[in-house]
Image: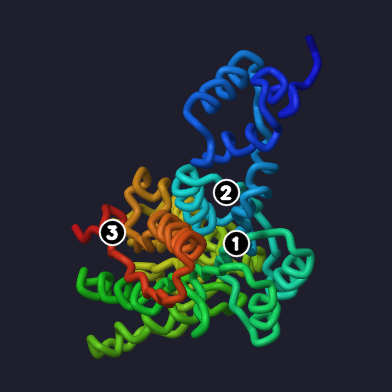
Amino acid sequence: MNKKITIYDVAKRADVAISTVSRVLNGSLNVSDKTKERVQEAIKTLNFRPQVNARKLASKEPQMLAVAVPSFTTPFFNEVLKGVKDELKKTDLDIILYNTGSKDPEEAVINFFDRGSADAVILISIDVSDTAHLHLQSSGVPVVLVNSQHKDYNYFMVNDYQGGFMAGEHLIKSGYERIGMISTPIKTRTSIERENGFKDAFKKFKKSPKKEYFITGDTSKHAGFTEEAGFEAINKYSKMSEFPDAIFCLNDSMALGALHAISRLGLRVPEDVAIMGYDNIKLSKYLDLTTIDQQMHTIGTQAISRLLAIIKSKDTQLFQTMINPILIPRGSTEKS
C-alpha cells in the first residue's frame, strides 16, 4: 500500500516498454492512440505522479529561474517580485530567490553563477561591472536586468530622474514655497537620479530652494530608504527656525516615517506641511499619500515575458526599455 509507484510499474501494467511510457509522458507523437490510451489508463489506475524535474531534465528544458535582489524587505523589490510571481504561474519554471545583500551584490552574483545553479536569471537593482559581465556571459544562461542597464543585456530601467523632476514640478505648481527633500545618507544611483531630477525642476521654474531643507535621516540600513530615516529627518526639521511647507521623500517608506513623526509633533498634513513619497506602494493609497508610481508590478511581469521569449524562441534581439513613472496626486499635497 505504501510502495512508491514508478515508471516501471506503469510499463508493466500497460504491457509496454519503459521508453513507451516516457514518450507518452513527454507528449511524443510516436505512439499509437491505442497504446497511449493503455498507458494513460495505467497511470490513472496506479495514481502515478511522474517526477517533474526528471521529465524536464530528459527534455532539456530550463528548470530553474534565479531572481537576485539586494534585499527582500523594501517595497520596491517586493512589488517587482509580485509581478515576477504572477507571470511565472504561466510557466513550468521553478524559482530561486537570491538575496545578495546591499554591500557587494555583484560579488554575490558572481559567486552564485560560479555554482551553476540556474537556467535563467533576473537581476534587480544590481549593476553589471566588466567582471560580472564576463561571468554572466560565460554561464551561457539568459539574463534580464531590472532597474539597471548594460549595453549587452535586455533590461527594464526605471527613469528615476524623471520621477524626481515630476515630484519637484508637482510641489512647485501646487504653490508651495518652502520645499524640502528627505534624501538618503548613502548615495546610490537611484537616490542621485531622483535628487537631480527634483533639483532641476526648481531650475525650470527659476526657483531657489533652501539648501538647509535638503536633509537626510541617520539610519543607513537599506541605504536609508526606511521609515526610521524619514522619522529622523522630520525631527531634524523640527529643530529649525522654520518648518518646510512641503517635503518630498525619496520613497514611500521614508514618507511613512515622516508622517508618523509629523503626527507626534502635532502638525497636520497637508494643512501645516505637505508630504510626498515615491513608489506608490499599496499602503500609500490608504494613507492618501501623493507619490510617484514606478509600475513595479508591470516591470516584473514584463521581465519574465522577455525572459521566456529568449528561452523559447532563442530571440537574440535586445529589448532595452526605459519605464516612465506616473504622478499619483492625493490628499497629502492638496493645497487648501
278 or 8, which lies in front?
Answer: 8
Of mark 3 and mark 1, the one earlier in the sequence is: 1
Secondary structure type for disc 3: strand
Q: Residue at x 70, y 69 (%)?
A: 109
Q: Residue at x 70, y 42 (%)?
A: 54
Of mark 2 and mark 1, the one earlier in the sequence is: 2
Q: Which residue is mark 3?
A: 328
4 sits left or right of 20 in the view: right
Q: Which residue is mark 2?
A: 93
Decide: marks 2, 1 in contact (CB < 8 A)?
yes
Decide: marks 3, 1 in contact (CB < 8 A)?
no
Residue 103 seen by the camera: no
List x then y, in percent, for residue 151. Answer: 49, 85
Q: Residue at x 60, y 59 (%)?
A: 67
Q: Which residue is mark 1?
A: 120
Q: Amino acid at mark 3?
A: Ile
Of mark 3 and mark 2, the one earlier in the sequence is: 2
Quote the CA–CA distance across marks 3 and 2. 35 Å
Q: For residue 217, which quarter of the picture?
A: bottom right
List x then y, in percent, for residue 335. Answer: 21, 61
